[in-house]
Amino acid sequence: MKHPLDRSWLYRAWQAPFVAQKLAPMRRRHPGLPFRRVLDVGCGPGINAPVFRHAEYLGVDLEEGYIRAARARHGNYFVVGDAGNLDLPGDHRFDCILVNSLLHHLDNDQVGRLLTSARRLLAAGGTLFVIDLYVPDSGLPRRLALADRGRFPRALPQLRRLISSACTIDCEELFRLHLGPLTLWKMVYFEARLGDVPCA
């Protein structure tokens, strides 16, 4: 039985208050988001697509319903695909690969395969951007992270170790998702390069 948030309209409504908050560190560090080719891995129903309308954008998601909804709203810039096995034409290279709120849906082996795929698809000098929740020690953000439909929420050291085992992390920034003064989730933003550390 599918989760209610697999319905694209409900997912968009659920995420609407948080889309800008999630991308805020990226926009602050890269004003205007000056990327030419963007790969959005785990793009869902295309909620990030409008932010990258100036770029050559491609969204990938495993959920066919999300991809149909994204194409209907934003055009034919989306494909059904497995994050752990990004089967794109060999000449595709991206200077920005965005993995936004996906890793807590993947086990460690799947994350490793995703990073291996990203190595093949990232252009020289390109950057991998990872945004995800983490499990803090206490409070509502911990309860919400553990209750998420993603089955693999991780503590921050685990998440950092997983990424740094395959990448060189250039930036790490902690932030929160909130409604008014209420913090709902604790989040982390990474910028990483894939050239210096061999993927396992």
Image (cartoon, rainbow, N blue to C red):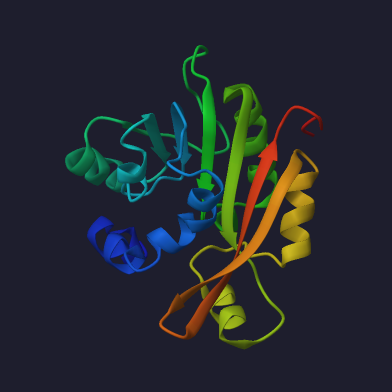
Please say if 133 is above or below 107: below
Q: Position of residue 133 (x, y in %)?
A: 58, 64
> Is residue 150 placed above or below 106 in the rendered structure?
below
* Residue farthest along the top direction in this orientation: 91
The number of numbered discs placed on residues in the rendered structure image is 0
Instruction: Please state the horizontal and vertical placement of residue 146, each as a whole percent of the image.
Output: 59, 75
- Of all residues, the one furthest to the front in this rendering is 31
Q: Quadrant of residue 56?
A: top left
Locate the N terminus and report the quarter of the image it occupies: bottom left
Q: Report the residue that reaches farthest toward the left.
A: 72
Tell which of 69 and 124 is nearer to you: 124
Q: In percent of the image, x 22 and y 39: which residue is there?
A: 74
| Residue ID at (30%, 41%) | 67
Is 162 displayed left or right of 75 in the figure? Answer: right
Q: Residue at x 56, y 86 (%)?
A: 140
Image coords of residue 122 (percent x, y): 59, 26
**Which residue is at 31% across, 64% downward?**
16
Left or right: residue 107 versus residue 88 is right
Q: Is residue 146 left or right of residue 71?
A: right
The quadrant the C terminus occupies is: top right
Which residue occupies the foreground of this view, 12 or 196?
Answer: 196
Q: In the rendering, at what x and y percent does residue 130 appear?
A: 59, 48
